Image: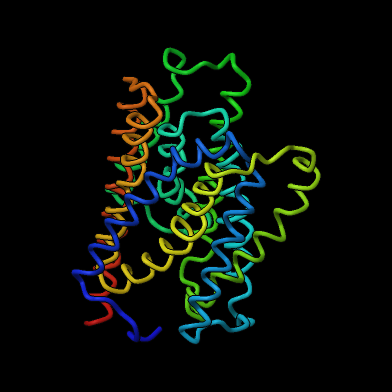
Amino acid sequence: MTNQGAVSQRTAWVLLAAVVVFWGVNWPVMKYGLQYVPPLTFATLRMAMGAVVLALVAGWRGELKVPHREDLPLVFGVGLLQMAAFMGLVNVGLQYVPAGRSAILAYTTPLWVVPLAVLLLGESLTRLRVLGLVLGLGGVAVLFNPLGFDWHDPHVVLGNGLLLFAALLWALLIVKVRGHRWTGSPLSLMPWQLLVAILAMLPFVYFFEGDNAIHWGAPLAWVLVYNGPIATAFCFWAMISVTRALPAITTSLSTLCVPLVGYVTAVLVLGEAVSLTNAVGFALILGGLVFASLSDWKKSQELKHAQAA
């Protein structure tokens, strides 16, 4: 991808901060929106609105093109796993789990990338990765300890399990597409990925939520506007711009603030309780993700030096 349309570093920092805030705040927004629309329908409407906006942007920039054959695995993989499965599972789980805790669980994705990359790609377990994995798994164990988690409530168990499974599926996709040589630009592929996700979601919406009422009105309209054009279309474009202008480690570590913003916002806006279990678990998971990100950054730096030599 060329540098055409690249933003300055100052603009990239502003965009990165906006993404962290918008994505973080969206967790309580989604929790609120589920009062008015069923979860799978919600995910489908969000993706449809995002697809329209991104298709218009891609067309305006001259990047709306039919995907190359080499990119089809990426189109279907991202569309089915990261978008349809991840968003659908997150929305269903969010019905039964507080927004702040949901954000924490969903953002364990980089944690699961570590063992999957070792098992499927044969990558080595560095000290930083081991430390990150131990801390992260310790945080998950704290979140699910019997003293702070109700194992007797099937809805609670289901919701938490779906959120972890969503994070695992996203991690699997990351591992499978790692090293993929993109033919088309991310912006040119995103509308097609969303289209795949929408088509995959529609049968589930029809069979599981066809008779469920949607409570149209101003509250739902604002939720959808926030989720479609802002949290999906704008934030995706912004992240493309940020990753082209800032170091990867900066972007990776900064996005770890998303669940923190989500947790704090859920406490302030929705009045969710602050529990010692969630606080300690989140701190350990966040520490684990930081070490895992540092390990990947260190590995990329070593690879660059080796290629330069």
User: Where's the N terminus, which quadrant?
Assistant: bottom left
Where is residue 27? Give x, y as percent.
Answer: 44, 41
- In this view, the residue farthest toward the front is 218
Colour logic? rainbow
65 or 284, nearer to the observer: 65
Of 112 and 272, nearer the camera is: 272
User: Does 304 sit left or right of 115 as displayed?
Assistant: left
Residue 73 versus residue 30 in the image, above or below = below
Relative height, residue 176 to residue 40 (above, below):
below
Residue 76 seen: yes
| Quadrant where the C terminus is found in the figure | bottom left
Quarter residue 143 falls in: top left
Left or right, residue 114 beside residue 44? left
Q: Which residue is drawn at 29% across and 65% down?
A: 248
The picture quadrant where one finds residue 252 is bottom left
Q: Where is residue 106 drawn, in percent x and y?
A: 47, 42
The vertical placement of 296 against 110, above or below, is below
Does any portion of residue 119 appear in the rendered image?
no
Residue 145 position, x and y percent, is 44, 19
Q: Residue at x 60, y 37 (%)?
A: 36
Residue at the (32%, 49%) spot, across then down = 21
Q: Position of residue 269 (x, y in %)?
A: 36, 32
Question: How many numbered dots are placed on residues in this image?
Answer: 0
